[in-house]
Structures are given as structure tokens and as C-alpha cells.
Amino acid sequence: MPVLGGVERLASRPAGPRRDALRRLSRNRLAVVGAVVVVVLLVIAAVGPALAPWPYFVQDLDAIRANGNRPLAPLSAEHVLGTDSLGRDLFSRLLDGAQISVSVALVVQLVVLVIGVPIGAAAGWFGGRIDNYLMRFTDVIYAFPDLLFIILLSVVLRDTFLGKAMSGMLLIYLAIGLTAWVTMARLVRGQVLSLKESEFVEAARATGVSDFRIVVRHILPNSIGPVIVAVTLGIPSAILAEATLSFIGIGIEAPRASWGSLINEGSRWIRSEPHLVVFPALALAIALTSFTFLGDGLRDALDPKLRGRQ
Amino acid sequence: MTDGRAGEVPLVEADGLEVHFPILSGILQRQRGSVRAVDGVTLSIERGETVGLVGESGCGKSTLGRALIRLREATGGTVRFDGRDLRALSPVELRRLRRRMQIIFQDPYGSLDPRMTVGAIVAEPIETHRLASGRAKAERVRELLRLVGLDPGFTARYPHEFSGGQRQRIGVARALAVEPEFIVCDEPISALDVSIQGQVLNLLIDLRRELRLTYLFIAHDLAAVRHISDRVGVMYLGTLVEIGRSSLVYASPAHPYTRALLSAVPVADPAIERQRRRVILVGDVPSPADPPPGCRFHTRCWLYERLGRPEDCRTVEPELRAVGDGQRAACHYAEIAQKSDVGVVEPASA
């Protein structure tokens, strides 16, 4: 059999969709900065307590007393960022807050993935009535005010078996996740809908590949890019939701410290001791922007066609 | 059916095949009508034969091709593959039968999964039907790549590293992986550069001979299918308007639509090009949701105008009837059309 047409030589650079994406990501300066900060944040969350000069709950009562029962200012001898009104080291509490924020991010996004992806995939793949029911249900959750829903959920769940088995903190995370999955479900549904009609899926059907394998081998791997981006961009909202809840006093329980509850406690001293608000707010802002930069960079890297669009 | 060799079961046989898509509207999703993409097509394809299928965009040729291998569900009529009613098969039986019928797609970019390596793409059908595993599978993949003229060392590459023509070869290798008998070629060369088209067409011709394949070769212009087809069918608005041996259809087309299509094919010889009579089809293709009554083509037919708009064209739907040796056309005035000088590119000797 003659070889028809020239067998072209291909460039020898190693390539693959993943490697290409990584190369594009590394060229985006903001995304690299975001990624570095995110990694630092993850490390702090993992080893935070070991780095902290003080345990987050210990009150340095002597220092407070010497200061006339007022919070210590930053750069004092034993407390880099000062203390709160109870004599607890602010820097150590910020590190503990990092742990809270990262665990919120992980747990909430896990809930979002576990609920949102299957619902979206089922709606998109089966279509018709199943799609209709799932999406109307999603719309109802979407239309409900998130904060109200989270508060109601955590109250309702608290007395159930599930709520008793979990600590109050985890319950809040779960409640946040239960409101946040709707965007993921919509995103995955859209991906599946368009991929379902693609010719490579049709080719797989033509060779007799089972529906389940088509979804797992062709459809999900091809929607993974937008899902990764959505997860990364969803993290700031999850962190923010937790901070908001802690700020209004229904999130984290004392003596643990979340950036939101730190801002709440500090707000009472905002005139005389602004550092109690400024540092947690700064930590929050840096974390949120880093995740957003990284998410934007990932979006551009994974799908260059989407660059510049929202 | 009278065409083809008698006494043998045709490999593919469609009888009154219909594919209608419902038009739904309103929040209750009530059916308002239907798009008749394929509306009563009767066609048989013999073993080892290549049938070309042409028609304008949206005439239903791709849908027909997919319905013949049950990649689209037909809404009426029957399709038989090697004597077995495809529409009556259970999902398991159908999946088993997929080994014997395959499809090659138009778009060399959309038809390959961008996240899979060439090796994985070609191996997937082999895994699905458990034809080989381990080393034997890897060897089979290399053999298939060689067969379609690709370097067998390309297995670890991704589709985006290849040119359109090479990608189309990968698609051919995937289709061949299950050792099929029948392949629907859905405009396999129309998306390629002209310089590459001939190579891929020749590849398909060589493979047909080597592997004794049967093709349904879909294209949107008559010139492309001429080279490869034993018989040619012409579709208009979901129906087959003419079918017959290629030599006959090209030399003495019996449907005014076929003649109009042929007259649109440019001729290299300027002397002939200047001489021949061309008709230009006016107006748009009517909507397949609401096809014209009588003959579907009468709204754009030059012969209808020339004959003074005879009434039966508007009221009676013409049947596909014999007009020559195995040639059939769906036109009340096929004999007149055949004698006309419109559209024929070359004298009857071609």
C-alpha cells in the first residue's frame, strides 16, 4: 500500500493540552504571583500552628495589664502585630484564620463538585424532562438569597443527626456549599450540552462506546478546564461567605479565629486600634485577589479563545 | 428494488426512511410541527459498491447517512443492514453491529477528541469491542496508522499537532479499527485544502479495493463524488430525486435539479464553458418544515417555467421511477429533461 501524501515531520517539542496550558499560565505574571501566594497560603494553613509564636487562644494577660487593659499595638516586644483586647497574639490568630479560610475553600468546593458536577452532567446528558426538573430545582436555589439560606440551613441542620455528628464549623461550610453548587451545575450542563453534539462524541457512539464511558472518557475530561477555573474563582466567594457569617457572628465559634470574626472583634476598637481591623482585612484581600488572579490566569491558559471575555 | 445485482441481499437497504425532528414551542414544549430532514427515502447499497450522495446544504444527506447506521433515530420506514432490521435491534445488539458499520466525518478538527492522543483515539474502538489488548493492541494501532499513510511513531501525539489532511487520516484509521464492511463518508474531503483532497480521496479508493469496503460517499457537489462512485444519488429537501449509475447520471441527467447542479460545475475547457447552457437556481431552498406541495422542486424549477407551469407539478408528488438503465428520477417530465441541453458538461461519451 503506497503511502499517500508526504509524512510530515512534526516539531519535536513535547506537547499536550496540559503542558501547553502550563506554558501559557507561566507567561501570565499576575497569575504566577497569584499562584505563589496561594501556595504560601496553603503551606501556612498546613503548618500554621507550628509557625505561630503563640497558640491562637492564649491570653498574654501581663502585657495587657501593663498596657492599661488595652490591646497591644503592633511591633511590641513579644507580639509582632500586637494583641487583641484579650491579650491574644494577632499574628498567631491571623495564621489560624488562614487555616479556617483554606479549609472553607476546600470543603465548600468539594461539596460544590460532588453536587454540582453530577447534577449538571445528568441534566445536560439526559436532557428532556430530567434536564427540566433538575434545572428548575437549581433555579429555585439560585433565586433564594444565599445568606438567608445558609443561616436557615445551619439552624435546621443543627438539630439533625448530621448536624450533631459534625462540628458547628463544618456545618457552616456545608451550608455554604449547598448554596454554591448551582453555578457549577449550570456550567457543567452547558459544557455537556455542547460536547454531546460534538463529532468526536458522535464518533465514539458510532464505534459502540457505552454512554457511561463517553461521559467519563470524552465529556468530563473536555469540560475539566472550565470546571477548574470555576472552582478557583469560586474559592474567594466561599472565603468571603465564611468571613461574612463570622463577621455577623454566626460563623466560627470562639476562641478560634477567622478573618471575618477578627474584623468583627476589631471593629469595636477601630478608632483607637485600627490595626485590629486592618491586618485581617489585608489578609482577606490578599487571599481573595490571589485566587482571582490565579483563576483568571487559568481560564486564559486553559482556553485561549476565552481571553478577555468574562 | 430493481437496481444493483439481483439475487443477493443488499448490504444496506432503506425503505421509506423518514427522520423528522419535532419543532417544540412554548413553556409546555408542545409540538408545533416537524422538520422533515429525511422524508421517505428508499435506497439500497450493494456489497462492495460506492454510492455517492449529493445535494445542497440542509437537504438531509448527512442525516440520511447517519440514519442508515442508526446514529440518528429514524422516525419512520425501515433500515436493514445485511438483512437485519436496524430499528428493531436492542442497544446491546446494535453496539455489536457497530463493528460492521462506521462513519468518517467532515470536520477533521471536531471529530477527534482534543484530550486524547492519536494512539488512544485509534485504540478506543479496539478496546470497545475487545479485539486486542496489550502488545497486540499497540501493534494493531501502529498497523492502522501505517495503513492510512501516517508514521506509526505518532501514537503519543495529540490531534492539534497535525494538519487537516493528517487528522482526516487519523479519523479513517479509527473507522477502520473495527474492520467494518460499510463506511458512511460524510463529506470527508470538503473541509480540506484542495491540494489535500485528492490524496484523501485516493486513500479512500485504495482502502476500498484493499479491504473490500462499501461506501456511502456524501458530498455537496457532483464533481467530488464522480471520481469515486459507482452510483450517484441526488437529494433535494429530504427526498431522493434521482439515482443511477454515475456514467448515466452525469451524461444524461433526468431530473431538472440534477441538471441545474451539473451546470454549476465549472469546466476547465473555456471553449466548452462558453458553449454550454447554464441555469442558475433562483431563490432559497424552501423550509423542510413546510415543503412545497406536489413536486418539492417546482418552486425553483427551470423546466416547470419552460413548460408553462404545468398543474401536476404543483399538485402531484412525483414518484421515483425508472427512466433508463437502472436510472431513476422523481420528475413528471424526466424524459423532456433528459433531452434538454441544460447542464450537461460533456457529450454522452463520458
Image (cartoon, rainbow, N blue to C red):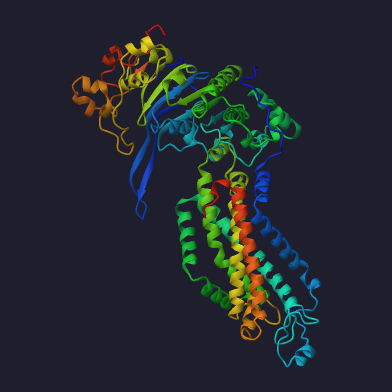
Closer to the camera in the image, B136 or A52? A52
Q: Is residue A32 left or right of residue A222?
A: right
**Residue placed at 67% from the left, 64% from the top?**
A106
User: In the rendering, at what x and y percent does residue A6 appear?
Assistant: 64, 22
Q: Is residue B52 left or right of residue A169?
A: left
Closer to the camera in the image, A33 or A210? A33
Quarter of the image where one finds residue B245: top left
Location of residue A78 with respect to A162 vertically, above or below? below
Location of residue A61 with respect to A282 vertically, above or below? below
| Residue A111 shows up from this direction | no
User: In the rendering, at what x and y percent does residue B320 appear?
Assistant: 33, 22
User: In the rendering, at what x and y percent does residue B118 appear?
Assistant: 66, 34
Q: What quarter of the picture does the N terminus of chain A occupy?
A: top right
Q: Is residue B342 left or right of residue A232?
A: left
User: In the rendering, at what x and y percent does residue A287 appear?
Assistant: 65, 66
Q: Is residue A82 left or right of residue B328?
A: right
**Residue placed at 30% from the left, 12% from the top?**
B341
Location of residue A40 with respect to A85 vertically, above or below? above
Quarter of the image where one finds residue B127: top right
Quarter of the image where one finds residue A62: bottom right
Residue lying at the far top of the rendered structure: B349
| Residue B194 shows up from this direction | yes
Count of number-bearing discs = 0
